[in-house]
Image (tube, rainbow, N blue to C red):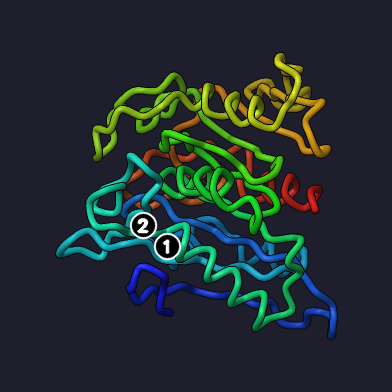
Amino acid sequence: MATPDGRERTYRLYVPPGLAEGEAVPLLVALHGGTGSGAQFAENSGFDAVADREGFIVVYPDGTPIAGTRALVWNGGACCGPAREDLQDVDDVGFLSALIEALVAGYPVDADRVYVTGHSNGAIMSYRMACEAADRVTAAAFQAGTIEIGDCDPARPISVLAIHGTGDTSIPIDGGSGQGLTQHPFASPQESIATMARLDGCDATPVESVDPENPDVTHRVWSGCDGGVTVELLLVEGASHSWMGHPAPRFLAEPYADLDASATVWEFLAAHG
């Protein structure tokens, strides 16, 4: 599709068979990680199967290619690769907003239930959509993301869930360059989600608990937010950068097996409309 920045962009769309006739359903915008692709994230996340089970449409947009490769990246602000801010004027907020508008117009999509998710660079882009396109996106939930723009100013309060592994060496839980390909000095994931809580007018101190069924998982919940939204963080002890609970591409570390990131993301998003 043609985009506001004059580019031609591509995406993979999955519409489950057997959606109820005449019923508007949610739309999930699923953003691949840096050097990934829409097709790769569809395979590694398993969101098609979740869409079949739960009855929603899912779209997997493609980022901007790194020159001479099929590896794709998003302009999440200061990250990542050739798409990052001020290099090629890549307007990914414009692209994703136009894609959402086209899908709402062309498919039985409920415009009040448009959600965004992503992994790594895709999670960073999810944060940017929450910051800059809250008028189009209902809620965001993702794994391994940070805020990489200087000014996050959501148009309205927006619910956000961040999932992060304490063993993530690509985007360390306390921020910094880590051991990933970019060597970018990432913002702190913990501070990023706390920033969203502050912007949403939530209580300053989150309620923290350990999952009684999985002691690796610590859950922080900010309540009292404006507009009845919630902001949450799932910290997973020892979990790597890879999308949890699903097979990882060969160049990523072994994924944490005892939490299904796709199911967790959808459970959070489906509760916000």
Q: Is residue 125 above or below residue 23?
A: above
- Provide residue 1's location: percent of width, then percent of height: 43, 79
Labels 1 and 2 touching (C-beta < 8 A): yes
Whether residue 209 is visible here, answered yes or no, is no
- Residue lying at 49% horizontally and 27% vertically, measured from the top left: 189
Q: Which mark is residue 266?
A: none
Across and down, in percent, residue 142 comes to: 57, 44
Q: Mark 1 to mark 2: distance in Å?
A: 6 Å
Which residue is more in the foreground, 122 or 82?
82
Q: Which residue is mark 1?
A: 40
Q: Could you say which quadrant of the image residue 149 lies in?
A: top left
Q: Secondary structure at mark 2?
A: loop
Q: Amino acid at mark 2?
A: Gly
Specify the quadrant of the image occupied by residue 14.
bottom right
Three-letter amino acid code at the position of disc 1: Gln
List x then y, in percent, for residue 113. 74, 60
Q: Is the residue marked by circle 2 packed among few (<14), some (14-19), or many (20+) residues within 10 Å?
A: many
Query: Where does the image place residue 128, in percent across and percent down from the top left?
Result: 50, 45
Tell me the element at label 1.
Answer: helix
Question: What residue is rendered at 24% in x and 57% in y?
Answer: 88
Residue drawn at x 84%, y 77% as measured from the top left:
23
Residue beneath disc 2: 36
Q: Nearer the viewer, residue 7 or 244?
A: 7
**Residue pictured at 68% horizontal, 31% vertical:** 232
Furthest-left residue in this view:
68
Q: Which is nearer the eye, 108 or 36?
A: 108
The reply to whether residue 71 is visible in this rendering is yes
